[in-house]
Image: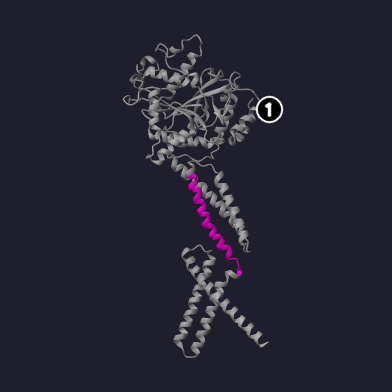
Amino acid sequence: KMAADSAATAAPAASSPAAAARAEGAGEDSDTSVVDIPRGAPIQVVDNDGLLVEDKLQAILTDEALCDKKVVLVSVAGAFRKGKSFFLDFLLRYLKHTDVPENDASDWLGPGTEALTGFSWRGGKERETTGIWMWSQPFYRTLPNGDEVAVLLMDTQGTFDNETSMKGNCTVFALSTLLSSVQVYNVMQAVQEDDLQHLHLFTEYSLQAYEGGHAQGVPPFQKLTFLVRDWSHRDSHDWGAEGGRAYLQSVLAQKPDQHPELRQVREHIHRCFEKIECHLMPHPGFGATEDPSFDGRTSMLRAEFLPVLKAAVEDILAPENLVVKKVNEEELTGTSLLCYFKSYTAIYAASDLPEPKTVVNATAEANNAAAKAEAFKQYTRTMERQCSTKRMLSDDQFEKAHQAAVEAAMAAFNKTKKMGSKELTGRFKDTLTSEIQDSHKFFMQNNRLKNMLGAFKTPIVLTLAMVVGVVAGWFSNRLWLASVASLWYNFALVALTCFLMWIINVAQECRWDVLNTAVTAIDSVSERVWDQIKAQSAAQALLASAAKAKVE
């Protein structure tokens, strides 16, 4: 039985649909009242905004006869105004006809005078279907293994109309892909590269909501059928499934000299679906496309169209070709399918997924770049917090702080939902590592500036140089050596200039590259002078000690 509070169930489901399915299946009894829906009618289960119409969907999927049955969900998706609902109604006509044992299964198209009814469809340029619709009546079939399953039909809003955003298009197609066991992808005239690019984008967006726990190497989705409408190239590939199989093989072939982007699209599609098929359909005839009075009756369709249509419908819905909906190898019932509907729609309604764009690679790069920037910010915040004390950290303490900051940054990067291939994510991760290494040098330099003795070697040397220059210049003047005095005063002035550069550089935390380079040179010279002074001092001390020992 389903939980009464949809808001309470949607939140945990969004993080793990499978867990939600198990939890709800084991939940306590709740309000079992459902809305009344017409039997055998199209029902909108996801509205135009991508929100679940939960009461109506629950009325369908928790029906006593369906709730514990394994489900086969057939969905048709594709661009708007391309005949998706028209084809879906022929699937519906076939299921209705074969649902009556007394009917001749081969005569399901009818005499040709019946109007095509079921899901709403019409000719013209304006969109008809919005959101996602499901036929309220399931059809029960027996699979070759003896299992009785419930077949459900689902119609989706067409993509790329002039009223829906790219995110709306992606959401509808993604939900259709996630929830169906047989996805019919309706395309016109040929499977073109933009069709594959869109499929790549939509399935990538679907994976953002998928649990990601599917076994390595096992595709997350089940069956994809390309339905190519108005196919006119019979000289190369004939109408039907056989011609479609050969044609699809050539379209999805991966060639050694293929552009990497094209090869990536094909690899992605093959990884996403367990089985991919194709049917090539002829043009239905001008009676269907140009006659305003056309109502779907088969007598107005082109004669060559009917046998190919019949074969395609029978092939998709043949018992041996029906595919039970599975998630992570778990076959779903009506009850568990409802849980997944609630979970997936909640994820897309949460608005925390990356915004899709028309070009999938641009979307993936922007998404990975944002994840990298946030992870680098995490590193700098952690290091600033660790190095904020006035006391210098020892090298061991500093490296421990650095490693902790790196782990925090990498954890932030890895947990962010990212689109695109593993190679793309790897490139951004390498860039993040490089930026962290550069920043590591900066933080190490700042930390070492806290060493009072080490930090003041340069100013001490420069101060001594200024004092020596001024004193030597004064004595030179007293001895009437004006040119020599001028040299000493200039020496003191150079020391003062270097001292001021050092002060400014410390105040700016070594962030000015040109000044930082100059001061680095000054530090290097000062270090050598300091070492010479120490060496001379040590030598004098040693000579003094030796002289004293000799006297004694």
- Which residue type does callout 1 highlight? Glu
Question: Where does label 1 land, which residue?
Answer: 28
Q: Residues within 10 Å of mark 1 (few under 14, many from 20)?
A: few
What residue is rendered at 55% in x and 58% in y? Answer: 440
Q: Quadrant of residue 241?
A: top left
The residue furthest top is 102
* x then y, percent, for residue 495: 50, 76
Relative to 232, say whether 383 is above or below: below
Q: Main secondary structure of the magenta part?
A: helix
**Left or right of residue 140: residue 293:** left
Foreground of the two, 535 or 223? 535
Q: Quadrant of residue 341?
A: top right
**Left or right of residue 1: residue 189:** left
Q: Which residues are magenta?
A: 424-452
Foreground of the two, 308 or 287? 308
* x then y, percent, for residue 46: 52, 29
* x then y, percent, for residue 129: 46, 26
Foreground of the two, 167 or 72? 72
What residue is rendered at 50% in x and 68% in y? Answer: 520
Look at the image and tell me whether residue 346 can be seen.
yes
Q: Secondary structure at mark 1?
A: loop
Q: Is residue 398 magenta?
A: no
* x then y, percent, for residue 80: 42, 29
Type of colouring: one colour
Relative to 3, say whether 488 is above or below: below
Q: Is residue 429 magenta?
A: yes
Relative to 369, say whether 295 is above or below: above
The residue furthest left is 235
Look at the image and tell me whether residue 125 can be seen.
no
